[in-house]
Image (cartoon, grey):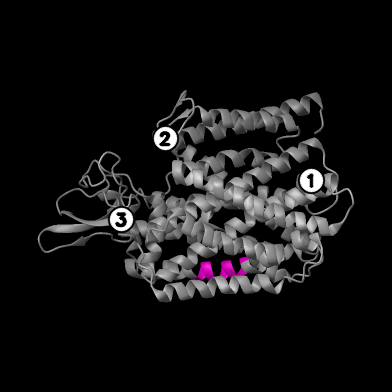
Amino acid sequence: MHLLNITNLDYIMMTILLGIIAVISYYFRRKNPSSGDYLIMQNHRINTLMVCLSMGGFGLIEFLLLSSYGAYAGIPALCLFVPCFLVASYFLGHKLAESSSLNSITSSVTTNIHQRVMLVCYALFMLLSASIAICVMVWILKNLLGWEFGNSTLSLLGVVLICLLIGGVISVLYNQILVLILSSLIVAVVVIIAYHGIGNGNLIANLHNVATENKLSANHFTTLQLNYSSLPQLWLVLVSAMLVLLINPLNRIKYVKSSKEAKPKLALSKLIQLLVLCLFVLTGIFALATPGSSSLSDGKRLVTQQTRLEDGSIGFVVRAVDSDTPSLARGIIPKQMSNSNDMEPIDSAQNSFDYISAAMVMVKHSLAAAFVSLFLVILLFYKSVTESLAFVNIVTIQSFYVPWFNKTGDDLENLWAARVFLFAYTAVAICIGLVFYKFFDLYYLFSLLVLLGLPLILNLLGLAKHFIVNIVAYVVIIASLLALNITNVPCLLPLIKFNDVFSYLNLATLSITGYYVLSHLIIKLIGRDSL
């Protein structure tokens, strides 16, 4: 079975939502007379509150990344992520808003080689982010409804592309406010219903029971234990918190649009961001704490497990197991199917869980109407894809096409070029997303995003002053990915063996950071400026 059974009412509700998004975009069709208005909202006057709200939302990647972490770690996930996000916002958030490397996307400032290399890397990274968002969306809709890649991708991306082509970035800003309000409302209601279902005061007790059933210490999911073994997790959480800021680059343009007097008020957006991200983490935590098995009269109980359906897709099956069989259940988080036998009985040896599905299972458990889950997917997908594609388009036109290729200076040419490139980038993102969907799992793709985004983060933090440092870093990263030998991950040359992707991610991110710190010190010692 699939998690959702869609009805005519659900189709009607989705049509209304997509219609509202399209109407907002259509409203701005004649309000972008120049490429500057279309791309960077040059002459648009925007209320400070609207800017704050549009900067407060997050997309599909952040939702699944943080909810799966909450489902995996429990309350310690929240205790770790909040301070890490505050640190990331203080350091990286300011650098992202003020970085001289990004000046050329909002002004006619001439860039040097180092800045151009960074812009190209950032644009390619965001194109990769759009592809991963497409893959995530298809994966979710496949699990929820059994929809194939073409059905879900072409329909939703068609709407997104039309809205971007018609309304420009200003329409994205106002639609992102809609995304923030509706998605936050849905997640907040889910969290409230889930907490009520668990029972007042039972959250900690339920998490203790889950830990005990999984043969862990009773406080494993409730108490943050900072010791040497938890340092790798803390490091990855900090890098992930910075990644959350990195994959929302339009906030830079929104920040520049604000007047100097209004900039202090934009601190409100940081509070909104923190609240939204906490809701994402809580969704996973409550999925972990919600009792997920039902007892039957014949001494058996029901559990939910992944399975492969008759059409080859992955769905879910509810199965009866003996009550005295150790279930190792973790709330309503589905168990992953066995690689050797899709219908292998659930026993104490099978303790692999589908943490990425936890959030959507929690939404379905709290609000059974199919359109609610679909609303959330559509809204968050719109946020992720428009953020990525719009930024790639802005970098292409503002930083490269206008100064290098438009010799006549005709602004109409820039406007048409922006639309052509947007269409082309959408097609490329779909193709890459299809490859990701066919050959890679989401854990690997999230790790890939962290790994490829780290050099950009270190650049923004001021640890790279020469373009060769970035080129060498990405060459080494790509070479290591091609030689990486991890079970169930395609590889070209299986030379570097790791047990799992997270072990590799820990070592790789620490090595990259060390390399950038060392390069920064060497460049300072020899007194070379960025080229």
Q: Earlier in the sequence, mark 1 or mark 2?
A: 1
Q: Is residue 350 above or below residue 34?
A: above
Magenta: predominant secondary structure element? helix
Q: Quadrant of the N terminus?
A: bottom left
The reply to whether dot 3 and dot 2 touch (C-beta < 8 Å) is: no
Question: What range of the chain is rendered magenta?
Answer: 176-185
Q: At numbered mark 2, what does the secondary structure look like: helix, strand or loop?
A: loop
Q: Is residue 309 above or below residue 183?
A: above
Membership of 177 in magenta stretch: yes
Dot 1 amino acid type: Phe
Who's the residue at 39% across and 70% down the image? 367
Give the distance between the C-alpha atoms of the residues marked 3 and 2, in whole angstroms: 25 Å
Q: At numbered mark 3, what does the secondary structure look like: helix, strand or loop?
A: strand
Who's the residue at 69% across and 66% down the image? 166
Q: Nearer the viewer, residue 329 or 201?
A: 329
- Which residue in the protein does label 2 denote? 500
Q: Is residue 373 above or below residue 428?
A: below
Q: Is residue 358 above or below residue 4?
A: above
- In the image, which disc is placed on residue 400? 1
The reply to whether dot 1 and dot 2 touch (C-beta < 8 Å) is: no
Camera-side mark, 1 or 2: 1
Dot 3 amino acid type: Phe
- Which residue in the protein does label 3 denote? 316
Q: Earlier in the sequence, mark 3 or mark 2?
A: 3
Who's the residue at 48% across and 25% down the image? 493
